[in-house]
Image (cartoon, grey):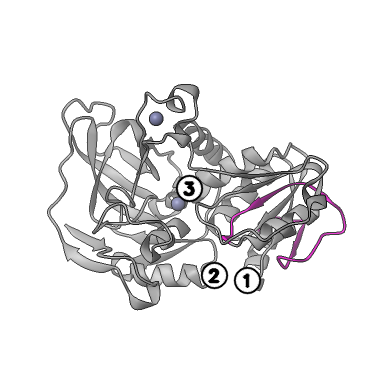
Amino acid sequence: MKACVLPAPAPVESRPLRMEDLPEPQPGPGQVLIRVRACGVCRTDLHVVEGELETRKSPVIPGHQVVGVVERCGPGATRFASGARVGVPWLHQTCGVCQYCRSARENLCERAVFTGWMVDGGYAEFVVAPQDFVYALPEGFGDLHVAPLLCAGIIGFRTLRLSGVRPGGTLAMYGFGAAAHVAIQVARHWGISVYAMSRDPRHQDLARDLGAVWAGGANDEPAEKLDAAVIFAPAGELVIAALRTLKRGGTVALGGIHMSPIPELDYNLLYHERIVRSVANNTRRDGEDFLKIAAEIPIRTEVREFALEEANEALNALKNDAIRGAAVLRIG
Ligand SMILES: [Zn+2]
Ligand SMILES: [Zn+2]
């Protein structure tokens, strides 16, 4: 199969991903072999490729927003028929027995395995995944347009939930890339007024197009204090900016897996029971709930298509904030 492989982490400008011909992977017990049609490009891929996340498999095929069809099932895998359209997310597998897995917090499993980092992902013509961690995908979405829902969408949804914002409330959204452009549609569906903060004028335009009541720079403050904030950009100083916009008792939820250091902050910014919390991965329940609501709304994703051979270019564009919406590799 054709695959886009990372031999060793390096800055994307040096084009670290290389096309290779590899043997097709074989589905083990409980696994499915999936013929990939599209794979979304996530900022976490950039962190894997550039080495902000430590190397866990080398070489590795990145990609964890994989859309494809089941080609073949391994021993004992009967959940999906051949030809079923499925999605493979970041959460590849959990242990199922630890305290987190047994208390509906499998996103925190200490033995969790992640797609496109610890095992090969979807920047390739085929991928294998455990059937229990694969999603059946709602109809009504094209392959390219459903791909960004699998991480940007699901993580954005969990971030919204953990921000504690209530229907009818007000929300600050920092960083207006793939996750935010989906999360704003869920927030508006819940009757939430969204204030978008981005350094990039093109992202501010997209936010207004998607119904933000206000769009401004990352350090601009809306006239009124807001109920909650979510941060999708990997810049620690945004935590300070977000705390400044918050009402008493409000939460700032951080949606990224990697962030630059958070600067020292004045305790007054945190006082009055404001909360800063991270979001780590997602449970399968988050994914199922989100895909259901995504189909109901229905969510429309804006995507920029790249060929598999252009994965370096796609990541470079993402790094430079040059993607409106989400980047997706067309593979099948
Ligand atoms: Zn576990
Ligand atoms: Zn991701």
Q: Is residue 5 above or below residue 150?
A: below
Instruction: Write down the residue under mark 1.
Output: 202
Give the x, y percent position of residue 212: 72, 56
Q: Nearer the viewer, mark 2 or mark 1?
A: 2
Q: Residues within 10 Å of mark 2 (few under 14, many from 20)?
A: some
Q: Do the residues labelled 2 and 1 touch (CB within 8 Å)?
A: yes
Could you say which disc has been placed on residue 321 in the image?
A: 2
Foreground residue among 103 and 288: 103
N-terminal of the pair, mark 2 or mark 3, is 3
Element under disc 1: helix
Quarter of image, res 27: top left
Q: How far apart are marks 2 and 1 (CA)?
A: 9 Å
Residue type (three-letter) at the residue carrying disc 3: Leu
Residue type (three-letter) at the residue carrying disc 2: Asp
Instruction: Write down the residue under mark 3.
Output: 149
Asked whether 263 falls inside the magenta stretch, the response is no
N-terminal of the pair, mark 1 or mark 3, is 3
Element under disc 3: helix
